[in-house]
Image (tube, grey):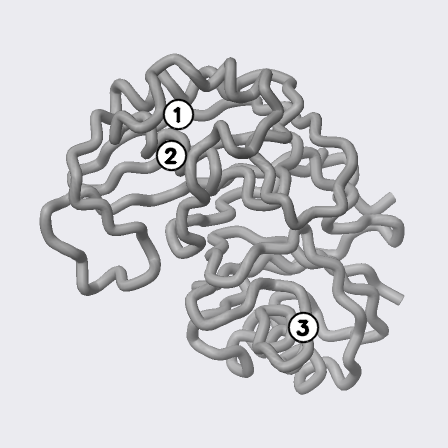
């Protein structure tokens, strides 16, 4: 039995998230279809996260225990032949038997991408948020720094959750501009349901003047979802990096 770690990327536009669902196409479903075709069995896979419908990933990690003996390099090539064009396997490596893509994660980096111009970008349909009103990236970058630290993020979690512990640690976050694209980035040890999208919605509220500047600490302290901004649409969000301790990846 081998335990493999697959690194994949996908454009989430036509998928109802990663996790398998009844009567809805998901990334896990098409990945398992390809794996069954190539590897000869429909092995159980463990994803590093449960991305929402429409969310994208530049780096998403999946662990799978399998009897398949195909070398990793060949497996990458074979899976990419079978996968649809909006899902790709970037890498594969053998990891220790007890490794789990989700539970061994030490943190993640997300980005939320905004096309900030008076006209829409036809070539990035539902892969960025279209926002026609001016954004002051320096101001928003300064505001975003108030998210950094260990906090109870109840105010930044959707009501539809069974999670009891709302405390998370944000290591770094900020906002920067490259031409007409404004990007919010955030790195942390974990994220609540819709947390990043509510962070973005709060920053957009500050930009619009509906939320006062400097109010993020008070919103966090309130633990009140109604104090934070709207939930930004899913299609601007990208999972960009999953962090692991390298020692956890090395075969003993």
Image location of residue 252, percent across then percent down: 87, 43
Instruction: Name the residue carrying label 2.
Output: 184
Tell me the element at label 2.
strand
Locate residue 160 relative to residue 118 in the image: left or right: right
Labels 1 and 2: the sequence-earlier one: 1
Q: Are marks 1 and 2 in contact (CB under 8 Å)?
A: yes
Q: Are marks 3 and 2 in contact (CB under 8 Å)?
A: no
Q: Residue at x 27, y 63 (%)?
A: 125
Figure quadrant of residue 18: bottom right
Instruction: Name the residue carrying label 1.
Output: 174
Q: Residue at x 62, y 24 (%)?
A: 223
Tell me the element at label 3.
loop
Locate residue 155 relative to residue 133 in the image: left or right: right
Q: Nearer the viewer, residue 73 or 50?
A: 50
Image location of residue 227, percent across then percent down: 49, 28
Q: CA separation, marks 1 and 2?
A: 6 Å
Instruction: Name the residue carrying label 3.
Output: 21
Figure quadrant of residue 60: bottom right
Q: Nearer the viewer, residue 101 or 210?
A: 210
Image location of residue 51, percent across then percent down: 58, 55
Q: Quadrant of the N terminus?
A: bottom right
Labels 3 and 2: the sequence-earlier one: 3
Image location of residue 104, percent across then percent down: 77, 41
Q: CA separation, marks 3 and 2?
A: 30 Å
Locate residue 147 relative to residue 46 in the image: left or right: left
């Amino acid at each position: 039995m081998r335990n493999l770690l697959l690194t994949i990327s996908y454009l989430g536009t036509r998928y109802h998230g990663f996790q398998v669902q009844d009567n809805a196409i998901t990334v896990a479903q098409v990945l398992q279809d390809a794996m069954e075709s190539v590897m000869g069995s429909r092995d159980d896979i463990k994803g590093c996260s449960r991305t929402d419908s429409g969310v994208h990933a530049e780096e998403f990690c999946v662990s799978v225990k399998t009897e398949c003996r195909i070398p990793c390099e060949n497996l990458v090539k074979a899976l990419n032949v079978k996968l649809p064009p909006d899902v790709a396997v970037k890498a594969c490596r053998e990891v220790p038997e007890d490794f789990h893509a989700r539970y061994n994660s030490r943190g993640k980096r997300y980005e939320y991408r905004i096309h900030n111009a008076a006209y829409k970008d036809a070539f990035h349909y539902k892969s960025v948020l279209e926002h026609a009103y001016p954004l002051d990236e320096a101001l928003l970058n300064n505001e975003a720094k108030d998210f950094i630290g260990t906090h109870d993020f109840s105010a930044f979690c959707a009501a539809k959750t069974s999670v009891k512990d709302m405390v998370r640690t944000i290591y770094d976050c900020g906002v920067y501009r490259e031409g007409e694209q404004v990007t919010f980035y955030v790195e942390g040890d974990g994220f609540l349901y819709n947390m990043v999208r509510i962070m973005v919605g709060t920053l957009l509220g500050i930009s619009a003047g509906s939320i006062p500047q400097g109010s993020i600490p008070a919103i966090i302290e309130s633990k009140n979802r109604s104090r934070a901004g709207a939930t930004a649409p899913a299609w601007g969000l990208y999972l960009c990096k999953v962090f692991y301790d390298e020692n956890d990846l090395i075969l003993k």
